[in-house]
Amino acid sequence: MRNNIVVVFCLLSTLCKGQTLNKFRKYINNNTEIASIIYPSEWIAKEHSGMELVFLRPQMSTADTVFRENFNLTIGGTMGYNTIEAYAEALPEKLKGYIESFVRQSFEVTTIGNLKCAKTIYNYIKDGFEVKVALYQYMLHGQVYSITCTTTKDNYKNYATTFDKIGNSFEVR
């Protein structure tokens, strides 16, 4: 019986490898308006500027040098839009000019905590990879905060819950 438990545990550990079901860590930046966001504790946080943060899944194999699951948080202007609904609705036309094979899968506006959030799921092709993105956007203090969570289309189901946890954890001052 004990051997069966060990075998099942090892099998589950192997099946879950690469899925970010582990503990989360809170990123806090006191130098910008970003109060906090959570991310998988084994992921690597990189601050590119005061307006962009990038979080990468650690490399697990040599194949990971080409693509790794990631998310980034960027802060930008409202581009003249007064609501997050209007801003996010205009997104497909903007992205089609920059992203090859852009296809929006879903779009919804919801309230997370006390904040309105526009969540868009879309696919595109990048360097031969079919990529799937969960984009969470918040409009606050005259800025749009975009959390872009990216994985391959085939791996999306493994990361969807993690991406929701990340996107829903966002807080500003």
Image: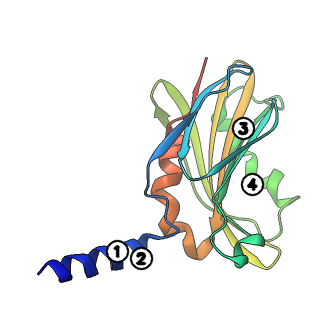
User: Which image quadrant: the N terminus?
Assistant: bottom left
Q: Give how far across and how far down residue 141 sits, in percent.
A: 70, 18
Q: Which residue is mark 3?
A: 87
In the figure, residue 104 lies in which quadrant?
bottom right
Specify the farthest residue to the left: 1
Tell me which amino acid carries mark 2: Leu
Q: Residue 114 at x, y = what percent?
A: 47, 23
Per the model, the C-alpha gap separating discs 4 and 1 is 39 Å
Residue at mark 2 to residue at mark 1: CA–CA distance: 5 Å
Evaluate if marks 3 and 4 touch, with contact meaning CB atoms under 8 Å apart. Answer: no
Q: Which residue is mark 1?
A: 12
Question: Does the residue at mark 2 contact the one at mark 1 (Cβ under 8 Å)?
Answer: yes
Mark 2: secondary structure: helix
Relative to 24, say whether 140 is above or below: above
Q: Closer to us: mark 4 or mark 2?
A: 2
Does the CB distance between marks 4 and 2 fall below 8 Å? no
Q: Earlier in the sequence, mark 3 or mark 1?
A: 1
From the image, state whether disc 3 or disc 1 is nearer to you. 1
Residue linked to disc 2? 15
Cα distance, mark 3 to mark 2? Answer: 39 Å
Q: Of the residues shown, which amino acid type is indicated by label 3?
A: Tyr
Nearer to me, 101 or 55: 55
| Mark 4, residue position | 92
Among all residues in the image, which is located at the extreme right?
Answer: 97
Res 113 quadrant in image: top left
Chain-order first, disc 4 or disc 2: 2
Q: CA distance from mark 3 to mark 1?
A: 42 Å
Give the mark nearest the N terminus, 3 or 2. 2
